[in-house]
Amino acid sequence: MIAGGFLGFIMIYEARAITLAEINQRWVRTEMSGGVEMARTTFYRHKLAIEEIFGILIDCDQRNGNRYFIGNNEVLREDSIQNWMLSTLTVSNVLSESHSLHQRILLENVPSGGELLRQVIDAMKGEHVVQDAVLRRRHRTGGKR
């Protein structure tokens, strides 16, 4: 799924209820759009992908001017891998949305975060005990023992 689908979701989340025309107005103002509106079919594909990947339902209130809204807000308050992924993608999309400002934005480097996570998951799969002190030491030393 391209960034536009997540950006559309973010627009719905921020507005609480928004029409497809309003989503397109905001979308066209982003650098990612290239000035081209998002087709209705593209929006629906992204809507289904967001539901499939994150379990977030984007519903439409046809009695209120076809306004889209998040139909199960409680999912956004859960501690889950899907919410962590959504949060990560949201940050990525916000940064991508304003690529022209990239030289003015400084991000903190997370050294070996992915590698450390992979080691912990491998240990858990092998039913090994992972101690917090070992994790902190390996993280500080870049994975060296």
Image (tube, grey):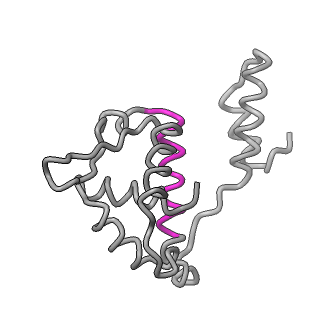
> Viewer-proximal residue, 142 or 126?
126
Total label count?
Answer: 0
Q: Is residue 65 magenta?
A: no
Image-based side of 63 in relation to 56, left or right: left
- Considering only vertical position in the picture, is 33 above or below 69? below
x and y percent of residue 30 in the render? 44, 76
Q: Which residue is drawn at the image coordinates 53% and 76% (left, top)?
A: 105
Q: Residue at x 25, y 58 (%)?
A: 18
Q: Main secondary structure of the magenta part?
A: helix
Q: Is residue 140 above or below residue 37?
A: above
Quarter holding the N terminus is: bottom right
Q: Which residues are magenta?
A: 79-95
Q: Residue at x 34, y 60 (%)?
A: 11
Residue extending furthest toward the left: 63
Relative to 19, 132 lies left or right: right
Horizontal and vertical percent for residue 117? 70, 38
Residue drawn at x 47%, y 43% is 48
Residue 90 lies in magenta, yes or no? Answer: yes
Residue 119, image x and y in percent? 77, 34
Judging depth in this view, the residue of 45 and 136 nearest the camera is 45
Residue 63, image x, y percentages? 13, 47
Q: Residue 75 versus residue 58: which sits nearer the camera?
A: 58
Q: Outermost residue, top direction?
A: 127
Left/right placement of residue 42 relative to residue 56 reads right
For the C terminus, the quadrant is top right
> Dividing the picture into quarters, in which one does residue 128 lie?
top right
